[in-house]
């Protein structure tokens, strides 16, 4: 049965233990950051930052709120990145994780275009660039450990388990406190369902969650496109290499 | 750039020329073996358990090592406090041990030198010992003007120690006292000294009453003067558990914090007005009879009658001397009468004993305190309390605090729910409470409220002082403070205690457990001076330094110490890991003071702002004549020893890896210093008063063995050197030695297996999170102190689901170690009526104090609201503007903004962030943490920003009468102006973690100092002189 993580945003305190636990387990270097106008940093997930907590201030039911939500790969049940990958570098494991094999990857970055959540990141600054993203600590899961971010979560925001059971937990929490929680489990159906599930006491659109994702699995949406792949097999990589070159140069300019 | 090729020396050479920007990966070395498949990463690693070295939570860690390197640090899933979880800082522990910036060599800067020189360890020990001796001897006071032996080395000072292990702190306490140090302070003065000063007189002990896990048992959680989910992140875990069971979280704070983000009720009150706010809740509780009646009558001093001479008028209690700015507190006392033990019964029979024996029961007649159990007597504590707090009406409190009246009502109603006997409420507080000119009275206010609601001694109740350093509880217990000896014995005072007998006579109460005080002191003297301490010489009592009036009559505490240093009175300073250049109040004054020293010894993990003070922005090193020795220290994972968390759990840590280069354990440095000093003093027959030094009992081996120190702390019999079971075995005849009595019992046997601090039994029979055999809590493993009060006088628990102790009709059933007389020496059970009459065994009246009697605190028996030292408004409650007993320091660098200042109209507050820790010098050297919070900022309201034309993210400066600090503007709705007495008053808040040294300083411009304490004031509270960091006046200006 696929695993999942339930994120209860009413519990998150924005301590960002998950952000550093991820860096430690995956041995990701620190990024050079500057003040971004809020507590958030780094600016986005990146090849060196697989997970990032967003901080959102606003008003809901005439009350001020400050909410924190963790972003990372959602590990779709039917991942677009996997079906977009021509060389099977992206793989959906039976237990839930969507993993990446750098030895197979040819750098086409279809996965980046395909992902509805804009998750995979490319190492534009490396001589032999890779796609980088959260891999749901599949290596830890293989030896019976929870993902590093879940284990480290002090406030009980993150709960790891069977996705089905987590959906039940989520429903019970909403049922028990119907006035507190939004009556929606984000990820239950979005993009055909994701391993990461969110419940919240503030509407998801107020937090900046993408709410125009739809509920159809993305591979279905990209099927027609994929039939055309053999035809454009030659043309697109050269185009992308061109883009890569320009982006790379821009990146250096920064 | 390959960062591994840059070592620290190269970095120093590059100096400020290399922007931190280029050093992205500096100090992060790859930990995992690249050859192993990912899932096998930890398969061949060795596991060592440890305790996190950041806040006082005491979370367990598992450290994975491979080939002598730490490869991974994770939360210990078995540890009851954190259950495998860790905050961001604790996760970054990995980068403390794998960090190229760590000091590996002794660094020395000669007077006026422009750069560091690397030196050998032996050279450093010899040179430093020489300087300690020369400075001590140059101005040593053997006898004072009255001929009393005082043994004071007034030119030497010692600070720091809260980041050290207990055994290290203990030896610092011991060696410093032998040397005669009186200017002896550390982090605890700055963080929780007012806690001890308030909780001690209220309940008998000065520490957190419950513990972290216990928060889960609360029905209401009141967070005031604290931000636990940011600063003690593990609290969030237990708040979540409590909330799942229906508990309410109330947060009172001048700004909306991450703790406020998960609260059920948030109260935004003006900084510095918490006494008014709590005073209102007390008033509401009394007016609406929401207090726990039986508890108040039976377990507190509410029925006690106070002398009719006691009074209070216009903000001043009886006995005030305006010239001295001090009280004569003799009227703050109980009425007494002559009566027999069975007073009430015999009195009903009409007997008023005047003879030595009661004519009815024939029991001896004694002087007893008068009580009125109906609580109606106008002189009863209860009625005086009602009268005092009756003034804290919703109208006036709303005007003072800026909290709307409906919110005040909601707050009082919600929290007073915990006054129901079966309900409990806990108060969590930290520096937002303690660091005020009335810090002690803030906490006294919590004590009064918690007693009225019957929340003390209860699971899920208590007053929980959350301590900020991993071992600041332990370092306080070890008394790295001028006014205490280990175990909260008062330090000898030349005037009051010229001899041991005088000390015993004055300091030993006739009742309470403190009646055993002579046993504690004499056993400590035996531990320190061994066979030399004999009855005939007062057990070497004369060896202890005795304090006098201190600098300018202001004592020897932190502020006085730095004032004395700034006045050139202190010539040598030993600093054990503290960073006052960032953390000290009015830090420019303190930086200037460091330049008046002849020498500074700084034991550190890295170059801190304190170590670097001579090359700080804006000064020329040549002008600073202080010699600086920086000694590389071992980090927690690189040594073994115990630390005490905020919940008083003494927890053992093991060594995982070796320290880098020449870095040594602090224990090692202390041991070498002592040995070198002893040799120097044995060789110099002319040095003053060498006995305390050369006769010091110091036998910890060639390479000091931490277990030997731990065993001395626990105590042993002097005749056959057998470890003591606990402090009940201590004697006052010299037959026992014990370093610190409250720790006795933690190492009761000779072997490592006897070390109870290392206990890892996960059993929790009560289900209340007591974990009785997981490590060891002082005193005698009590997890929730004052636990007699969790049950009614008959011994029935107030809430059967939260039973700590229970009388079943014949015996006590206990889930925690009883904090009361429950068994007699023969082992027979003592029935509940006896202990019901003595529920607070550490206070002479054996009842908790709603009314703090004479000598308990300096400000008065009841908390009273006064405005902060710097305030935009006049005090609305009385004509007394500020705390009438604080000492006001003068001088150019101590300027003050007047009330309602036009130049500095904005209220300033400082705070901490979860991503950084204290002065930031550890976390700012950890790239992962610096990534999260890279730069200094100041939070301002959108209204203020638009009034000043400030854009989000723009660099601005915050200016006070004392200095200025650059910061990025953070415009947020989390702050808003307070509506005070019909007028709007703006507020700004800033973190105080930044400075000018390290990987991240607070901004890209390394020629700037980003320390917020440049603008705070040198003003302390009336009891402990804890600085008022948390509120001041300032202005914000565009760059």
Image: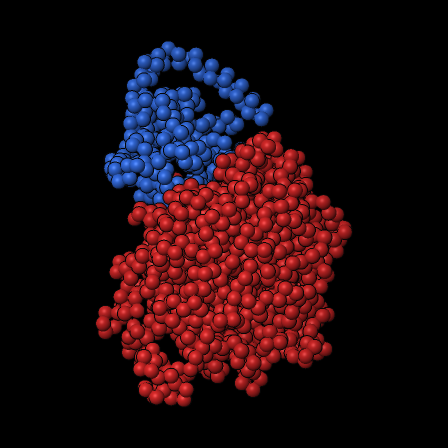
Q: Where is residue B442 in the image (x, y as percent from the top left)?
A: 50, 57
* Chain B visual colour: red
Q: Where is residue B344 in the image (x, y as percent from the top left)?
A: 34, 78
* Chain A visual colour: blue
Q: Nearer the viewer, residue B354 or B1008?
A: B354
Q: Position of residue B294 (x, y in %)?
A: 32, 65
Quarter of the rendering occupied by the C terminus of chain B: top right
Q: Which of B860 and B990 is in front in this view?
A: B860
Most extreme residue toward the top, as rendered?
A231
Task: Answer whether residue B856 is visible to the viewer in this image.
Answer: yes
Residue drawn 23% across and 72% down? B809
Question: How is the rendered protein coloured?
Answer: by chain
Q: In this view, does B735 lie above or below A149?
A: below
Residue A36 in the figure: left or right of residue A149: right
Q: Which of B500 and B117 is in front in this view?
A: B500
Quarter of the rendering occupied by the N terminus of chain B: top right
Residue drawn 25% across and 37% down? A175
Q: Which of B5 and A27 is in front in this view?
A: A27
Q: Where is residue B1012 in the image (x, y as percent from the top left)?
A: 60, 46
Residue drawn 36% across and 70% down? B373
Residue drawn 68% across and 62% down? B564
């Amino acid at each position: 049965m696929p695993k999942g993580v339930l994120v209860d945003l009413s519990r998150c305190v924005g301590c960002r233990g998950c952000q550093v636990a991820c860096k430690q387990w995956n041995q990701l270097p620190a990024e050079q950051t500057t003040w971004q106008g809020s507590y958030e940093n780094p600016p986005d997930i990146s090849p060196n930052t697989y997970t990032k907590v967003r901080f959102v201030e606003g008003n809901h039911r005439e009350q001020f709120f400050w909410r924190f939500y963790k972003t990372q790969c959602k590990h779709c049940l039917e991942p677009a990145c996997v079906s977009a990958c021509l060389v099977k570098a992206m793989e959906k494991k039976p237990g839930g994780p969507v993993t990446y094999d750098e030895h197979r990857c040819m750098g086409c970055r279809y996965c980046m275009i395909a992902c509805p959540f804009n998750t995979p990141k490319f190492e534009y600054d490396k001589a032999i660039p890779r796609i980088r993203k959260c891999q749901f600590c599949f290596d830890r899961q293989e030896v019976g450990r929870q993902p590093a971010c879940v284990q480290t979560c002090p406030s009980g925001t993150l709960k790891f388990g069977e996705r089905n059971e987590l959906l039940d937990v989520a429903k019970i929490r909403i049922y028990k406190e119907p006035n507190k929680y939004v009556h929606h489990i984000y990820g239950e159906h979005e993009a055909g369902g994701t391993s990461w599930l969110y419940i919240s006491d503030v509407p998801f659109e107020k937090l900046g969650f993408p709410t125009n994702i739809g509920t159809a699995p993305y591979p279905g949406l990209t099927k027609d496109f994929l039939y055309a792949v053999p035809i454009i097999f030659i043309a697109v990589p050269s185009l992308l290499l061109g883009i890569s070159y320009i982006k790379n140069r821009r990146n250096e300019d920064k | 750039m390959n960062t591994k090729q840059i070592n620290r020396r190269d970095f120093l050479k590059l100096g400020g020329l290399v922007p931190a920007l280029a050093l992205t990966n500096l100090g992060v070395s790859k930990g995992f073996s690249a050859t192993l498949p990912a899932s096998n990463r930890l398969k061949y690693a060795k596991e060592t358990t440890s305790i996190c070295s950041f806040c006082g939570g005491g979370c367990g860690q598992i450290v994975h090592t491979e080939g002598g390197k730490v490869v991974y640090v994770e939360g210990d899933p078995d540890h009851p406090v954190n259950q495998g979880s860790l905050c961001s800082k604790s996760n970054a522990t990995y980068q403390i041990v794998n960090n190229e910036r760590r000091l590996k060599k002794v660094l020395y800067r000669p007077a006026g030198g422009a750069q560091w020189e690397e030196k050998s360890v032996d050279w450093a020990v010899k040179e430093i010992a020489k300087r300690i001796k020369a400075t001590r001897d140059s101005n040593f006071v053997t006898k004072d003007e009255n001929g009393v032996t005082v043994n004071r080395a007034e030119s030497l000072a010692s600070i720091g120690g809260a980041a050290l292990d207990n055994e290290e702190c203990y030896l610092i306490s011991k060696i410093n006292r032998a040397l005669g140090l009186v200017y002896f302070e550390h982090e605890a003065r700055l963080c929780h000294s007012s806690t001890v000063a308030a909780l001690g007189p209220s309940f008998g002990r000065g520490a957190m009453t419950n513990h972290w896990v216990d928060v889960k048992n609360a029905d209401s959680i009141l967070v005031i003067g604290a931000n636990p989910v940011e600063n003690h992140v593990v609290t969030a875990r237990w708040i979540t558990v409590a909330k799942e069971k229906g508990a309410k979280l109330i947060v009172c704070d001048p700004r909306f914090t991450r703790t406020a983000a998960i609260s059920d009720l948030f109260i935004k009150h003006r900084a510095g007005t918490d006494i008014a706010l709590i005073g209102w809740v007390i008033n509401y509780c009394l007016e609406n009879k929401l207090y726990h009646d039986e508890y108040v009558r039976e377990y507190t001093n509410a029925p006690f009658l106070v002398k009719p001479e006691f009074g209070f008028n216009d903000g001043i209690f009886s006995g005030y001397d305006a010239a001295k700015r001090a009280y004569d507190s003799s009227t703050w006392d109980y009425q007494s009468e002559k009566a027999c033990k069975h007073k009430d019964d015999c009195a009903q029979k009409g007997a008023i004993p005047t003879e030595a024996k009661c004519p009815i029961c024939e029991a001896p007649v004694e002087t007893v305190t008068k009580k009125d159990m109906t609580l109606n007597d106008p002189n009863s504590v209860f009625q005086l309390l009602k009268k005092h707090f009756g003034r804290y009406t919703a109208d006036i409190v709303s005007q003072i605090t800026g909290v709307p009246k409906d919110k005040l009502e909601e707050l009082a109603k919600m929290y007073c729910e915990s006054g129901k006997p079966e309900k409990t409420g806990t108060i969590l507080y930290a520096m937002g409470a303690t660091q005020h000119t009335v810090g002690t009275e803030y906490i006294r206010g919590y004590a009064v409220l918690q007693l009225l609601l019957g929340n003390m001694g209860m699971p899920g109740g208590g007053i929980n002082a959350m301590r900020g350093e991993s071992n600041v509880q332990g370092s306080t217990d070890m008394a790295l403070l001028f006014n205490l000896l280990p175990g909260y014995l008062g330090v000898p005072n030349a005037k009051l205690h010229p001899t041991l007998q005088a000390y015993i006579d004055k300091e030993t109460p006739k009742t309470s457990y403190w009646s055993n005080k002579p046993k504690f002191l004499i056993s400590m003297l035996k531990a320190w001076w061994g066979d030399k301490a004999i009855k005939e010489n007062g057990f070497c009592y004369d060896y202890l330094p005795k304090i006098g009036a201190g600098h300018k009559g202001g004592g020897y505490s932190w502020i006085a110490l730095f004032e004395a240093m700034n006045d050139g009175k202190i010539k040598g300073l030993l600093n054990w890991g503290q960073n006052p250049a960032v953390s000290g109040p009015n830090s420019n004054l303190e930086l200037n003071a460091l330049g008046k020293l002849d020498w500074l010894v700084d034991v550190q993990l890295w170059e801190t702002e304190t170590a670097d003070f001579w090359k700080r922005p804006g000064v020329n090193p040549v002008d600073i004549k202080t010699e600086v020795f920086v000694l590389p220290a071992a980090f927690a994972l690189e040594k073994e020893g115990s630390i005490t968390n905020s919940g008083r759990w003494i927890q053992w840590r093991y060594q995982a890896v070796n320290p880098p280069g020449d870095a040594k354990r602090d224990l090692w440095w202390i041991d070498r210093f002592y040995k070198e000093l002893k040799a120097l003093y044995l060789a110099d027959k002319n040095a003053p008063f060498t006995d305390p030094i050369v006769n010091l009992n110091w036998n910890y081996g060639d390479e000091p063995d931490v277990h030997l120190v731990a065993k001395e702390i626990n105590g042993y019999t002097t005749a056959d050197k057998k470890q003591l079971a606990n402090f009940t075995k201590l004697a006052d005849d010299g037959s026992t030695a014990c370093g610190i009595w409250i720790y006795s019992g933690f190492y009761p046997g000779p072997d490592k297996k006897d070390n109870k601090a290392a206990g890892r039994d996960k059993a929790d029979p009560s289900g209340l999170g007591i974990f009785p055999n997981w490590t060891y809590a002082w005193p005698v493993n009590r997890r929730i102190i004052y636990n007699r009060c969790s049950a009614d006088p008959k011994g029935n628990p107030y809430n059967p689901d939260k039973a700590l102790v229970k009388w079943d009709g014949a015996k006590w059933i206990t889930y925690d170690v009883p904090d009361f007389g429950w068994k007699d020496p023969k082992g027979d059970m003592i029935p509940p009526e006896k202990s019901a009459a003595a529920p607070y065994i550490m206070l002479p009246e054996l009842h908790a104090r709603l009314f703090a009697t004479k000598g308990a605190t300096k400000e008065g028996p009841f908390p009273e609201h006064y405005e902060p030292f710097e305030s935009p408004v006049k005090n609305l409650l009385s004509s007394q503007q500020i705390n009438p007993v604080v000492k006001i320091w003068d001088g150019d660098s101590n300027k003050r903004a007047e009330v309602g200042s036009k130049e500095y109209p904005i209220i300033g507050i400082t705070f901490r962030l979860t991503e950084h820790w204290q002065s930031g010098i550890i976390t700012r050297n950890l790239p992962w943490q610096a990534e999260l919070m890279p730069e200094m900022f100041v939070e301002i309201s959108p209204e203020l920003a638009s009034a000043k034309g400030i854009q989000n993210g723009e660099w601005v400066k915050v200016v006070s009468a004392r200095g200025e600090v650059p910061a990025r503007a953070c415009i947020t709705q989390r702050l808003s102006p307070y509506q005070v007495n019909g007028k709007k008053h703006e507020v700004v808040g800033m973190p105080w973690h930044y400075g000018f040294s390290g990987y991240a300083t607070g901004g890209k411009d390394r020629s700037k100092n980003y320390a917020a304490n440049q603008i705070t004031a040198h003003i302390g509270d009336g009891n402990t002189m804890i600085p008022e960091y948390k509120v001041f006046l300032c202005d914000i200006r565009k760059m």
